[in-house]
Image (tube, rainbow, N blue to C red):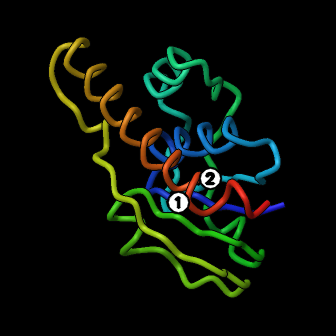
Amino acid sequence: MLKILILCTGNSCRSQMAQGYLQSFSRLLEVHSAGTFPAESVNPRAVEVMKEDGIDISTNYTKSVDTYLEKEWDYVITVCDDANETCPIFTGKVKHRIHMGFEDPAKAIGSDDVVYRKFRKVRNEIKEKFLAFYNAYLKDEK
């Protein structure tokens, strides 16, 4: 079983969505997400737009990267530039470190319609990139 950690700053949107998608691609993957400065909770809009695509992240909660520093990982993937720049040194073994940057939909401003469009756009980008990653690197490696 491959162990994957997805990092973001707040662990409230992008990393949660990426975790949801990777877990939906294969139950043989052990996927966790965390934040360098975790928010209080998962963003409700992230939960809602993932539900629209059939992925339930409503029971997820935010976690600190500190929880995972000593563990061994096949992949540590950062999904925001801040987390990539402030990612701590892992004392555990990390086979592959990857960065896939996405805009932060939580920073979108405007009407509900405008904000939800941004969340859906980022969700779709995450799904597309993580499916390509899964097919290229994980599908046959489990």
| Location of residue 82 in the rendering, given as x and y in whole percent from the top left corner | 34, 64
**Exactly how many numbered labels are in the figure?**
2
**Disc 2 and disc 1: Cα gap in Å?**
6 Å
The circle drawn on residue 64 is none
As drawn, 1 above or below 21: below
Viewed as shown, does residue 46 lie left or right of 30? left
As drawn, 24 above or below 51: below
- Secondary structure at badge 1 equals strand
Q: Nearer the viewer, residue 41 or 69?
A: 69
Q: Quadrant of residue 104?
A: top left
Q: Nearer the viewer, residue 39 or 128?
A: 128
Crowd rating for badge 1 (residues with CA inside 10 Å; few <14, some 14–19, many 20+): many
Crowd rating for badge 2 (residues with CA inside 10 Å; few <14, some 14–19, many 20+): many
As drawn, 62 above or below 43: below
The residue lying at 47 percent from left, 56 percent from top is 8
The C terminus: image quadrant: bottom right
Q: Are marks 2 and 1 in contact (CB under 8 Å)?
A: yes
Viewed as shown, does residue 112 lie left or right of 78? left
The residue lying at 74 percent from left, 42 percent from top is 26
Q: Nearer the viewer, residue 101 or 40?
A: 101
Viewed as shown, does residue 135 lie left or right of 4? left
Q: Quadrant of residue 120?
A: top left
Q: Earlier in the sequence, mark 2 or mark 1?
A: 1
Q: Which residue is mark 1?
A: 7
The residue lying at 63 percent from left, 82 percent from top is 90
Question: Which residue appears farthest toward the left when viewing the image?
Answer: 110
Amino acid identity at mark 2: Ser
- Secondary structure at badge 2 equals strand
| Location of residue 99 in the rendering, given as x and y in whole percent from the top left corner | 42, 67
Q: Which residue is mark 2?
A: 33
As drawn, 4 above or below 54: below
